[in-house]
Structures are given as C-alpha cells and as structure tokens.
Amino acid sequence: MSQTERVLLVPPTTIYGSRSADFFAGVKQTVEALPPMGIAIVSAMLKQHGGFEVKNLPGGPNDRSLVDGTSWADVVVISTTLIGTESTQGVIALARERGKKVIVGGYGPTFLPEKFEGASVVLGEGEPVFPQVMEDLLGGHLQPQYDSRGNYFDIYNHYICPDREILESFNGGLLSVYPMETQRGCSNNCPPCSAKKFQGGVRVRDIRDDIAEIETMNIRPGGMLFFADNNTMHLPEDQLYGLLTYLSQKDIRWATEGTVETLIRDNEQGGRLLKLMSPIGKKNGGCYSFCYGADDLTRKVVAGTKEKTEEVLPKAIRLFREYQIPLHVSVIVGLDNHVYPDSFYRMAQILEAYDPHHVFVHIATPYPGTVWGDNVAREERLLGFPYSDYTHGKVVFKPKNMESEELQQGYYWLKRRLTCWEALKGLWRNHVDLNLIRQKPILGMALSGIPWFLECAAAMQELSRQGKIDQQVQRDLDNDYRNYCGRKKL
C-alpha cells in the first residue's frame, strides 16, 4: 500500500439522534454541539504520519454524504460510543461492500468488540497503538484487534493536540466551541461510570502545554473554551490556579464539568479560584457553565466516591449563586438502591429546596464496562433494547426495587415536577435578572435556566402528546408527593 491513502473520518453518533425532534431540543442540540475530540486527534496523528488525504463527516454515521465518502476513501476510521453501535455497524457494512479497510475505536468497541465485526478494533486509547496500526495499514495487513488497555498514554510529555482545522468543520453550534482536554482519567470508581476502567486514574498535562494549545486557537469574541475533562477540578491546585489566572487575563469564556469539593475548600480559604471563575467583573471571560454530577441524592455518600456527600450540594449551590457561575446539576434515577416512589420524591424535595440553576435527570443506564452495568448483564436484567436506545431517557433494564414502567413514569414525573408552573414561578423569582440579561445576555440566560427549562417542558409536552406519559399515574404521584412532603422534612 502506498503512502497516498485517502482516509474518511467518521465521528460518534450524538445522543440527540434519539430525541424527539421538537423545536427546543433542536435549539439545545445546536447550542450544546461539541466537536469530537477523539476523531480530531486521529486526524492529527494521520497528518503527522504523512501521506494521507483526510476528509471527515461532520454529521457522523447518518451523514447524507456517507455513500460518497466511503466510495472516495481507501480507509474508513470510525470513533464511536455505545449509542452508535448499530449505526456504526451500518457504516462498516457499507465500507466493506466497497472493499475498504475499516478501523474503529472508542468506548463501544473497547467494551463490546464483538459488535464491530468486519473492522480492525482498537481497545482502549488510540495513541499507544497508533504507530503499529499505521505500520500494518501501510503494509497491507491490519490486525483484527489492537489492545492498549492498561497502557495509558503519557499526556504530560507526549500529548497530541487535536487537528483544529478538522474541528472547525464540525462546529455547527450557535456559539463557537473550542474543545480541549487538560487531563484524562478519574480517581473515583462510581458503579454506573466507565471513566476509571477506560482511562485509569487521573493524568494531567503540563500547564505550559495547555496554554500553548489555547494560544493556537485564537479564540474569537463570544467563543467558548470547553474542557472535555472527566473532572477539571482534579487538576493539582497550583496548576488549576495558573490555568484559571491565564483564562481570566485573556478574558476567555469557558465551560467544564467536575466535582465541587475543591471549590468549597477554596471558598473557606478566601475563594481565589472562585474569583477567577466568576464572570462578574469581566468583559467576556469567566465560567459560563459548570456541570456537577451529584448522581444519587438518596444516599449520604455516593457509591464509589468519597467526595460526593449529602452536604456538598447545598454548599455548592450557594457558592455558585454567590459568584454567579451557572451550575448544572446531574442526577440519576433507577439505581439498585432506589425505590418507587419515595426515591423520586426525595430527589424532588432536595432539588426544590436547594434550587440549582438547572437539573439534568438521567435514567440509570447499564453500560457494559461499568461495575453496575456488568452486574445488570450478569443478573440477566437487560431488556434487549438496541444500544441506540441507551439515551438516559428510556428504561432498558429491569430495576431491582421497582417495575420498569414505574421507573419510566417516575422519571417523567420528576422532570415534570422540575418544569411545572410552581417551578417556573420559582425560576423567575430566584434566577431571572433582567438587568444582567440586558448587560450580558448569554450569562443572564445561562443563570436564569430558562433555555433548559423550556426544552425540558417542550419535551414533556411532546411525550404526553405521544401517549407515553400515563396521566393517571402522574396525578397519583402529584397527590402522593404532597402527602410525602407533609410527612418527611429535609
């Protein structure tokens, strides 16, 4: 094989592909669209290696130009998550029909390699095995599997920056989004999560390397730097302080996810990190979105972590409100310790009392490769749905302490509760600052929670119209919740 090969890059299917196509969901998809880091790093490695002409499909496996793309290419490289298993199988079949070589990697192939027959499968991170893959590709003898599991890439000394040129072609959001990563891995081992198993413990990049990459982005006014980290707050504190100082000096707007214990401690010591994060007093910069995975609000300590404790959430919400940093809280329903309906009532009671800017509600989803997901499969509690249904909005397994339909309706009820008329009045009273919206529209709307409220409310209306929400069950839950609040106080 000569070194003039044409490579088609296919990014992961997004979770939005399985959502109802209402107006607000479309707006949310457009605003929150994140260019795929994995496929951009593959593009960078191909270009470093030389001899490859690269094209990409910004629309992923469902892109309308897929047929033309696979006809043009000599090699098809696919990055995929579990949700894209079925669509990726279609791309593999199409490429193989045309006699193309196919390489696939990512979360799905790592934990379910048998689902990607017909492709050379990369298990684990791609960087450690990429030189061997290229040697075999150019030699015409790709292997069925390349296994890097446990061989975690040295991102401190040898990080490969993503191909920014190809990332720009994926950026279809209303706001320009510039993704980057400062670390990989996780120190927690939460049962429903795969981060620890897939990427090992925390590895961080050299802060000088981080800043040098940001400098190359030439971030435009209004652009958003997004840290695609498992937990940016797990950076060593001096490095985190240096990075936030740089962002503040450059007046760069940014978003991230992480735990909040570092920031609670920081506030007790004067709040030097929180002051750098706060958008107030800055022309454009500051943290405009912080996602905190509170996960299981029914336990004093979330399983698998010592950080996510009962008292953390109210402290974090007060801090983020004080420094006017938009906070998104993520919670999970349907874990093995949850019972119907009390667990849903408990979460609603906590969230209504503490009142974060916005709440993501997820149905527990048994991903292979996670401690909990593997247990569900071993206990034969999977319901046989395709992986395209693993959207966090559909029950795909048999819960331990409730029926599947009880979990589904409880999930609907909790989302309805968070978007009811009383919730809207509370949102308007506690979070909407018209002066701030006039002065800083993006920040004001983010702090208000209105965009996410409207998207969730519209989705609930659409599901109700489709007959998926059992109205009698919902009325019964509404009535019983009032009695629950009368019996049990926070």
Image (cartoon, rainbow, N blue to C red):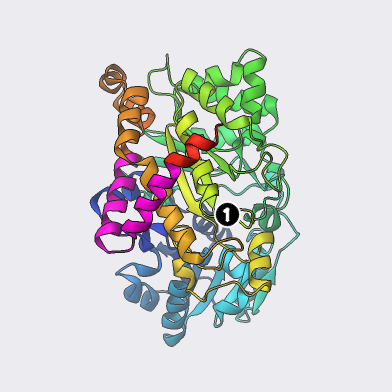
In which quarter of the view is residue 192 placed? bottom right
Looking at the image, residue 186 lies above or below residue 198: above
- What residue range appears in magenta? 453-481
Quarter of the image that includes the C terminus: top right
Where residue 279 appears, x then y in whole percent?
Answer: 44, 21
| Nearer the observer, 160 or 399 | 399
Where residue 394 appears, x then y in whole percent?
Answer: 44, 62
Quarter of the image that includes the N terminus: bottom right
One can see residue 333 in this view? yes
Where residue 204 appears, x then y in whole percent?
Answer: 68, 40
Horizontal side, residue 143 vs residue 462: left or right: right
Q: Residue at x 38, y 57 (%)?
A: 473
Residue sitting farthest toward the right: 150
Q: Is residue 478 magenta?
A: yes
Where residue 97 appears, x then y in whole percent?
Answer: 43, 87
Q: Main secondary structure of the magenta part?
A: helix
| Nearer the observer, 239 or 99 | 239
One can see residue 216 in this view? no
The residue at which mark 1 appears reads as: 339
Q: Residue at x 55, y 32 (%)?
A: 489
Looking at the image, residue 325 lies above or below residue 32: above
Horizontal side, residue 452 vs residue 390: left or right: left
Horizontal side, residue 59 vs residue 101: left or right: left
Amino acid carrying mark 1 in the image: Val
Q: Is residue 14 magenta?
A: no
